[in-house]
Image: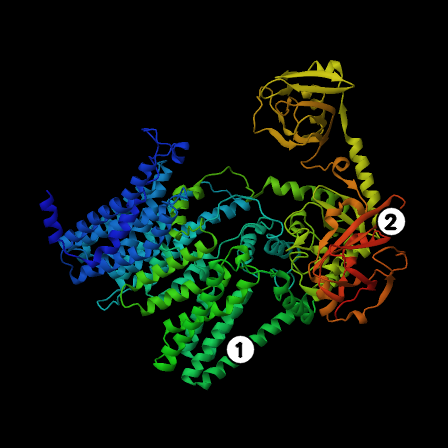
Amino acid sequence: MIVKIKSKFRNLKFNNNFILPSIVLTLAMTLIYNPLNNIAVNSFDRSLGNGLLNGVDITKRINNIGFFNFILIPIIFLIIYSLISSLFDKINEENKKYVTCINNVSAISLGSIIFSYINKFSQKDYFGVGIKFITCFILICLVILLISHKKKTIEFDLFKWSLFAAIPITLFIIVICNKLEVNISMKIFMISYGLILSSILRILTIKFNSLNFIALKKSYTLIISIPIIVSVCLELVNILNQHSIFINSKAEMTIIIYILIGVLSCIYYLRIIRNSNDDVKEYCFEKYYYPLIIVTIVLIATQMPLQNIINTDFFEQSNHGTAISEFFNYGKLPIIETFDAHMLQNELGRILYGILNNDYYGAMFNEYSLLPVFYLLYYFLFEKFFNKDISLLLLIFFPIASDNAFQLFPLSPLVILSLLFAYKHKTYKACILFWCSIILSCLLKLDMGFALAFSSIIVWGIVWLFERENILIKRLFLSFMSVVLGGILVYIGICLMKNISPILRIMEFLKLCQSNINWGYSSIGDSQTIAFTICYFVIPIINMVLVLYLIYKNILKSHDYLNDKIIIVLVFGIISVLNFSRGIVRHSLVENTTIHVVSTTSLFISMIIFMYAKRQKVLSFIVSEVVFMILLGMLTSPNNIFPKPIIDGALSKFLAFESYKTVADRKVDRVIISDDMKQVYIPLKEVLDATLNKDETYIDFTNQTFLYALVGREKPVYINQSPGLLSGEYTQQRFLEQVKVMKHRIPFVLMPIENMNLSRTLDGIENSYRYYLISEYISNNYRPLFKIKNFAIWCSKDQYDEKYKLIYDLIKANENNYLTGELTKDNIDKFVGINEELSLKNDELIIKSTGTDPILEGLEKIINCKEISKQFPLINISIEYESNKEGLFELFYTTDKEEQFTQDKSISAEKSMSGIFEATINCMENTKIRLDIPEGSTVKIKSIRFKGIEKQNNYDFKNQIQFVDYKYLQLEHHISNLGDIPYIWANHDKIRIEDKEEQLTIDNAYSKIDFSKLNKQQGNYLYINGSSSGDGTMTVHLGNESENGFVEVSQFKFSLKAGEDQKYLIRVSSDFMWYSNQINSIKITSDNNTTVNKVSILKGDTLK
């Protein structure tokens, strides 16, 4: 036996052609085996160790891992490689095309399989449908190659066409199977695909001489496009639903589309034959099929469901969500009238969705993906750099969308292709198209557009240095001036139509964009880490060296013609250099991300490797990409390196058949807001609807600006994240100018209570201090009125009395509407307590839990549901309680006579040890009500109040609104940690301290002061001159001195610098307590006994 094996190995010829597919198949097959399974202890020799504590057999684990790495994988590889090599002893010229195809597929799919291996032990879905498809695809290619090799009957071009021809037919068969309720798995899908492919090849080989293959390829283009038409029609059905036109037979519709277009394809085929002659030109089907296949796969992967449940952040969603709301509801144009920091990137798809679905509310959340466009653009770019086949395989089988270049610069192919077109044709028209592509990139995403613009201009400069064609530069300049002038005229025209100052708006826009100081961190990461050096120094230097090397080797030294590949690589390389600064502002290693600092590096270097690799170019490119993705992932997120190819998402979504599910013949809300979001915005909306006129709105000072859209109020300012996007004094001044224009329609200001995302601070600086001009304006013109759960509402001083009376009347009216259930002995006897004891004491119901799941039934006995249901569809129940423990309160109800209590009809809430449990339920004649209290608790029911209501969320003004004064926040929310800001402001401000108007001088570090004559309209500084022997911390305490002592209401902490007569300047008026008339004393302390030489209050100022 051993001799035979040795003989086989001696006779085995080493065939390079099949190493790659053997490796890929080996890795794919061994993905199934987990060496960490079956390591439980099943024998014991009394040797004790840590493994035994958790039942782990250390020896088994060692053996399993060793077997997997050193025995299983090598043996399977040798078997597969030996089998394939023995089957294909000699490869002719025709079959070499098969081998090349198989090797390309294997090389490109190797990346996805490596990522699956990396996530083998950390991700449940590591062996995704995409990997299964790739494996089966390679096997199918090998089988067809074997048939062709043995029988020499299948030409490669025929096989290649059949690969794509089988796709729409397979999808068609799978849809029919789903309609027939046949359970479809990935295995069945691939078997179906293989059988259909084989059938097509069989038919073609038999009937080839009688078929007009060119006509077939042409006419079949219609069939290739069917999945795209189906995808569009599936969404069209959802759109029609929004217009109350209902089509539930989605599978039947799909089948009809296939049949109709199939018939049209046959007619087209016959027509081509009838009109053709012997000199028919060859039809390059790849030119048309490949883009259609890519769009098909991406459309399936991004197919929008009929309905989405939304749970989003009120700050992040505001950029585009508020822009969409303002566009549809108030006709405000994006960019010109609303500032989205991400420009149109997240708006175009939403605008299209809103128009087609007539769903302006849903458009704030839903969008039609632009991915099909981006994938198509990258296909055409890669076609220029690689070839059609590699480009297709790369986009489908490799997770190229996870490359930073694809994520950050989705329109880069458009600009590069237009650059190549202009370079080739050198006409005014081509140059104008180039500049238009730059403008489109800027409008879609400003940082992308600027990076592409400057990198392209540098490339044009290199072109000029190389070719010295002055006429080209002249045309570029003149076309640039034409496009810019046209853009300026359009911009000015729109501004004048909208009654906006073009100059002020563009200045505001530019200031908002120049926000590095506003958003940058003091640190760019931990300098002790490897990632710090690699990302900030090694990679940028390598990029710069490679760019210079490309210029030197291909232009200065060789004087070769600048081909497309060199220009493409140069653009990506220059982008990686120019975009570097973005990675050291905010989205840096501080946030554990490398996407901006590295940007296009991986694609740039991988392309260079592809260009200069002497063999296995595709494999070299893929290995480079994979290494970069793994390296960058390990540097930042070592537990989350799992990019997937687009084919994985497409097949997963298609085989789930979510898009084919039927719904009732009714209009469906395509967006459902999560309960967490409703708990925030619905109370606010109820209050504002009851207290504001329809055309009135508010100022948002919480950074939860998306609430404007959710509560249906117009945003009075330009920025979409208020005040978070403001940067510097100028943008604050513009903000206030916009507010003043609408002041008569802005009675309220929304102020933070709960610490929601960025609602109080941004990067350690209090929003009130960062945006001091706005906080001072609010303090001067508004005062606290009331608070609800998450927010405080300040009211304009001009309308304070009016709004106070309105809310007071609402509270009284709300209070009078409630009826109270009588907690008497007769009523208590009607209740049924399960696993609990009931008693009555001082007209209060005592419920004591005596077992699991304590239940109180019969609450409807004291709530007259029968009478209420005659007038109202809903009933609001308010239960005031005290409990000896926190826990879950649940109220169950029924609506039908014989109905049992179910979880579907229940209201639950985690409650504290005292408070009010509220529930609004459907009220019917036979409604029954049950209350479940926390297990093991004793609950005292103090009152049960109820009222009939017309609609859900009728606001309980009495219990939810509380009038407040300036003291509604604790001291902890009036503490500002300013670090070096007071020192920098005093010593480096453009306006010197000597030029600021002094209003009041304070004698010592603890003084009681008369503030009555202080001018606070323009804000105030507290100036401190101190001498310190060393660095330290100083604290300014603002408060009220009375007979009862000093009560602190506001506090500012900052860093001290060693030295004599050091100056510090604090904008004390930024805290609204400065305007509360509750400050009459200032106390200054330090941790190093700093001598305070002078303290004075200065009048506020602003930069001109």
Circle 1 sits on which residue? Answer: 480
Looking at the rendered structure, which numbered label has been put on residue 861? none
The residue that appears at 22% across and 55% down in the rendered structure is 18
Q: Quadrant of the N terminus?
A: top left
Q: Is residue 111 left or right of residue 792?
A: left
In the rendered image, which quarter contains the C terminus? bottom right
Question: Residue 824 sits in which quadrant?
Answer: top right
Q: Is residue 216 left or right of residue 1?
A: right
Of all residues, the one furthest to the front in this rendering is 1029
Q: Is residue 445 visible?
A: yes
- Residue depicted at 37% across the width and 66% down the height: 607
How many numbered marks have been drawn onto this rendered protein structure? 2
- 325 relative to 664, above or below: below
Query: Mark 2 falls on what kind of element?
Result: strand
Q: Nearer the viewer, residue 837 or 819?
A: 837
Per the model, the C-alpha gap separating discs 2 and 1 is 67 Å
Left or right placement of residue 995 versus residue 855 in this view: right
Q: Residues within 10 Å of mark 1 (few under 14, many from 20)?
A: some
Rate crowding at label 2 as few (under 14), some (14 to 19) or many (20 or more) other CA atoms within 10 Å.
some
Q: Is residue 554 above or below residue 1026?
A: below
Mark 2 vs 1, N-terminal side: 1
Q: Amino acid at mark 2?
A: Glu
Q: Which percent across, then down, holds residue 61?
A: 33, 39
The label shown at residue 1041 is 2
Q: Residue at the location (86% across, 55% down)? A: 1007
